Amino acid sequence: MSISLLSLLSPSPTCLSRSLSSSSFSIERASCTTTTSLALNGNLRGRERCGRGMPGSVSFERRLVERAAGGDQPSGVVLEEPTSATGSSGSLNWEAFAAQVSGEWDGYSAEFNFAGEPIQLPSNIVPDAFREWGVEIHDWQTQAPTLAHPEEGHLWYKVIRLHPTVGCEADAATVYSVQVSDVQSNVSALAYHSSGSYTTVWRGKCVTQESKSTGPGKEVTREGDVIELEQCIVHDRKRIRVLQQLGARRRVMIYRETWEGPFRNGESLCGCATGNSAFATQKPLQGDSLAGSWHAELYTAQNLENQQTFISGELIPSGVEDFDRKLADEALYLPKDSWTCLRKSESGNAVVETGWLVQPDQAIVSICEVGSFGDLKAVSLRVEKRIPGK
């Protein structure tokens, strides 16, 4: 059964936080002033205005409500201390994640430079007919069979890129390359959410070479010490995966995929049957569509410390907030209502915000902080709804 992340919204938490930094990894770096007043119902109400917002495109005003001793249930925006997911709860949530992420994901991928311009596919793989007609090809048609193993934290998938073809004959689809990715092989941490969304950091630059096996197509492996961040956002059996190298020569690879059925290890090529279409040259998201007042449900990853060996952490509810989003100069607006933004934290770490406007009034945003050695310092997921009339 299809489950949307937006349908997983829990009621506003009733436990109150004593530390703003627990709700989001970036709040502690904001400069804030607080005023309090006594409401008619006996509740202490606070308003905290922060000079800087979430790293990325967000600045915000946080409104707090605190329940006085013996007072009624607060009805405003509140924060709660996140609790670690341990024991059977963690296993059950991993099973929920596995049910949503596992399967055959078909779609298209495209690469963009730091200016948001799509990069053409290599000319040697583009059919002669396209070159004769002056048609530029920017999108790969892809398949990504994905499997979350019963063992918590063990996520595996492979990316199959298909040769561009003229026309739409399913039997004309042939494999250009295959890349197998196992998070327990060359990443230090995985943060996951029960909706199927996740964040991880890969080590090594992707290199395409002749296959050493008997399988079809070329083989793509990772070599070197390049750090590449992957953020996956899932909504209503569709997802975007955004991969970007966190170096000086920044490029962004985007996959837009639809769940086509249970996991079959890519045994059949999708041809033109996929419900997606090429998107690289479509109109990018207009930044103005993100401006305004929003309400966000927050999910924060736990247990990401000590990444000497592979660890995984679940993104669990950590509070809510109302905020005003303003446009950021650093934001890279992309086709199909998505964006990404890269900044440096005060400690010199990379802070990356990637978002997807799934509806005009609904967005899902993944934010993470990555250390210089590729370790995930913090990860959060935000499920946002526009506040009407603001």
Image: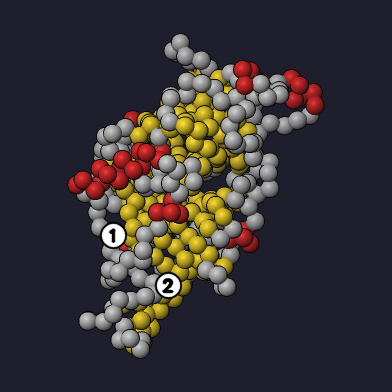
- Badge 2 marks a residue whose secondary structure is strand
Q: Residue furthest right?
A: 133
Q: In the displayed structure, would residue 248 be above or below residue 133?
A: below
Quarter holding residue 157: top left
Query: On the rendered structure, is 146 left or right of 92?
Result: right
Query: On the rendered structure, is 43 left or right of 108?
Result: left
Q: How many marks?
A: 2
Q: Position of residue 202 (x, y in %)?
A: 41, 37
225 or 32: nearer the viewer: 32
Mark 2 is surrounded, within 10 Å at the Cα level, by few (under 14), some (14 to 19) or many (20 or more) other residues, namely many
Q: Position of residue 297 (x, y in %)?
A: 41, 61
Q: Position of residue 186 (x, y in %)?
A: 35, 32
Residue at the location (47% across, 45% down)? 234
Dot 2 amino acid type: Arg
234 or 306: nearer the viewer: 234
Mark 1 is surrounded, within 10 Å at the Cα level, by few (under 14), some (14 to 19) or many (20 or more) other residues, namely some
Locate the N terminus by quadrant. Answer: top left
Locate the C terminus by quadrant. Answer: bottom right
Looking at the image, tell me whether mark 2 or mark 1 is earlier in sequence order.
Answer: 2
Q: Which residue is mark 2?
A: 62
Quarter holding residue 328: bottom right
Dot 1 amino acid type: Pro
Residue at the location (35% across, 71% down)? 78
- Badge 1 marks a residue whose secondary structure is loop
Q: For residue 230, which numbered disc appears in the image?
A: none
Q: Which residue is mark 1?
A: 82
Q: Position of residue 304 (x, y in %)?
A: 29, 48
Residue at the location (51% across, 52% down)? 355
Residue at the location (44% across, 76% down)? 49
Is residue 9 among what the camera can see?
Answer: yes
Q: Residue furthest front?
A: 1
